[in-house]
Image (spheres, rainbow, N blue to C red):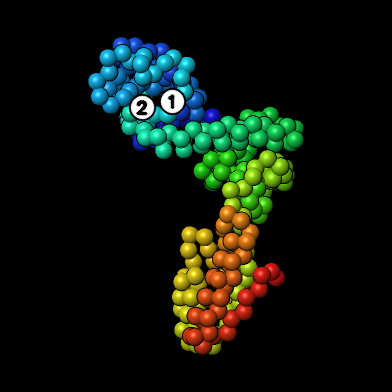
């Protein structure tokens, strides 16, 4: 459950509480104690004769936040400004978060601590760092080093990773390899930056490990594809760096 208020333009999951001739009052499922209002003009496009033909009490809906007045506690929402693609994505996101909340309870149970205490200790920080609680579980399932890479430590980390690996099936795999680049050219550093930047893409990221070693991270739907992308990226780096007079070597693992 999120704290505070949603942002203008945000998509939210809501449950219809009551319907009036002029609109519908809803509770926000993701925000504790927060309610909103959908004016009849924001229920559906075109003229609405009977509002209950379009919405019913108890129904879960995906709405777009139009305005937030924190001083009055008012949240104005729109149903008609959410397209089908947005609706489906938001519902899946909400389902993922519900699953993550249940997994977080398992983490708390294994640690022998109250859930609220775990949220205060590391839960809210995970949300800030990964964008959502489910995002944290997903990343931990894909790469168990991600917690330390993000600066998290403590006895809970190992438990969190274990629960993630037991319950989350990653949507992609992540592998890595290393290239060692050496050169005696006066502008060698610029050569290195140039060839590494040329190999980076949406699925390929490169980070500095320690001279002369650079780590290539690859993300793909399966290992076979990932290995192919990794090898191609390494080959490109080596060929381009050698053209600039440098020496290069690829290593799958140290």
> How many other residues sit within 10 Å of disc 1, few (<14), some (14-19) or many (≥20)?
many
Q: Secondary structure at mark 1?
A: strand
In this rendering, the answer to whether 204 lies above or below 110 is below
Mark 2 or mark 1, earlier in chain: 1
**Residue depicted at x 53% and y 63%:** 204
Q: Nearer the viewer, residue 175 or 71?
A: 175
Dot 1 corresponds to which residue?
Answer: 61
The image shows residue 22 at horizontal and vertical percentages of: 29, 14
Quadrant placement of the N terminus: top right
Identify residue for label 2: 79
Report the residue at 41% width, 38% height from top: 85
Could you give the CA–CA distance between mark 2 and mark 1, rounded to whole angstroms? Answer: 8 Å
Disc 2 and disc 1 in contact, CB within 8 angstroms: yes
Q: Position of residue 2 (x, y in %)?
A: 51, 31
Give the side of residue 220 with respect to residue 20, left or right.
right
Does residue 22 appear to the left or right of 62 in the view shown? left
């Amino acid at each position: 459950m999120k704290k505070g208020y949603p942002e203008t333009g945000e998509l939210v999951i809501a449950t219809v509480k009551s319907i009036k001739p002029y609109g519908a009052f809803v509770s926000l499922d993701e925000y504790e104690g927060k309610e909103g209002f959908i004016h009849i003009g924001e229920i559906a496009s075109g003229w609405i004769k009977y509002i209950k033909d379009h919405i019913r009490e108890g129904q879960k809906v995906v709405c777009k936040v139009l305005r937030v007045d924190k001083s009055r506690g008012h949240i104005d929402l729109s149903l008609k400004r959410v397209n089908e693609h947005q609706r489906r994505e938001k519902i899946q996101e909400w389902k993922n978060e519900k699953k993550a909340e249940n997994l977080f309870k398992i983490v708390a149970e294994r640690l022998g601590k109250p859930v609220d205490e775990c949220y205060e200790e590391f839960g809210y920080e995970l949300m800030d760092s990964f964008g959502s609680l489910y995002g944290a579980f997903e990343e931990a399932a894909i790469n168990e080093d991600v917690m330390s890479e993000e600066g998290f430590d403590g006895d809970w980390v190992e438990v969190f990773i274990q629960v993630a690996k037991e319950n989350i099936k990653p949507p992609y795999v992540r592998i890595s390899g290393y290239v060692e680049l050496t050169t005696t050219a006066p502008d060698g550093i610029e050569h290195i930056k140039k060839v590494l930047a040329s190999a980076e893409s949406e699925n390929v990221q490169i980070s500095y490990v320690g001279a002369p070693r650079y780590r290539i991270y690859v993300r793909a739907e399966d290992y076979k594809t990932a290995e192919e992308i990794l090898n191609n990226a390494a080959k490109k780096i080596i060929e381009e760096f050698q053209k600039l007079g440098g020496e290069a070597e690829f290593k799958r693992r140290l």
